[in-house]
Image (cartoon, rainbow, N blue to C red):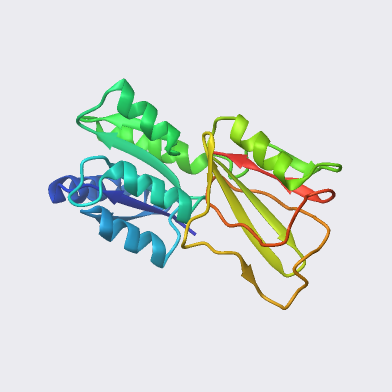
Amino acid sequence: MPKQVLIVDDEETLTWSLAKSLSNDRETYEITTANNGETALSLTREKPFDLVVLDIRLPGINGLDVLLKIKEERPATKVIIMTAYGSSEIKAKAKARGSLFYIEKPFEIDQMRDLILKALREDEVRGFDGSITGLQLPDLIQMNCLSQVTTALYVRKDQREGCIFSRTARSLMPRSAPWRERKPSSASFPGRAEASGSSGARRRPGSPSAQTGNISSSKG
């Protein structure tokens, strides 16, 4: 099944040109386009995209804020930032908010194609995958924060699950991703965690620790 790629730019001629030029790769990925941040977020909320190619200067909500929202709500979605107003500061901000790649305009179509293919080939799980014993859940959160990278820690216990999102030295919980409980369960239980992902946030009430369990985590 082809991967799903969303291209977001306020210039309709650019999104149309990219979609048409990249259509030769349609067996590998399918292109959807948007011309503002609100439409882009609406599309990513309707269905998951494997990759978003995102311009910074957009009408309404700017690209860096759209990037942050996407990484909170769809942590597995990779993002390529593109801009005609590049600087080392903008590049650092994009990286801190979770962008995988950064490219400045003008660029050749082949450059963008190479970045898209490279992003889609990135391993979904990068980092630790295994078991940990003797650690409290706060210890895992602290380690993620100290790593200074955008990280998501997915935790599952019985029928309850959630995700703790860490962006550089901050941890936050997006409103759109509350802990959900599929079956009634005790509010207090021994910790067992399974963690994987690349950025996003939910926290389960009453889960004090991750003393034993299977852990896999990814850093974006």
Who is closer to the viewer here, 140 or 15? 140
Seen at 17% across and 50% down, the residue is: 59
Who is closer to the viewer here, 161 or 49? 161
Q: Residue 101, position in %: x, y?
A: 40, 33
- Name the image quarter holding residue 47: bottom left
Seen at 60% across and 50% down, the residue is: 164
Q: Residue 3, position in %: x, y?
A: 45, 54
Left/right placement of residue 163 relative to residue 58 reads right
Seen at 25% across and 45% down, the residue is: 62
Residue 76 against residue 149 in the figure, above or below: below
Residue 112 against residue 196 in the figure, above or below: above
Residue 173 against residue 142 in the figure, above or below: below
Left/right placement of residue 108 relative to residue 4 reads left
Residue 121 against residue 66 in the figure, above or below: above
Q: Residue 207, position in %: x, y?
A: 73, 58
Q: Residue 179, position in %: x, y?
A: 60, 64
Left/right placement of residue 81 relative to residue 213 reads left
Seen at 33% across and 63% down, the residue is: 42
- Name the image quarter holding residue 149: top right
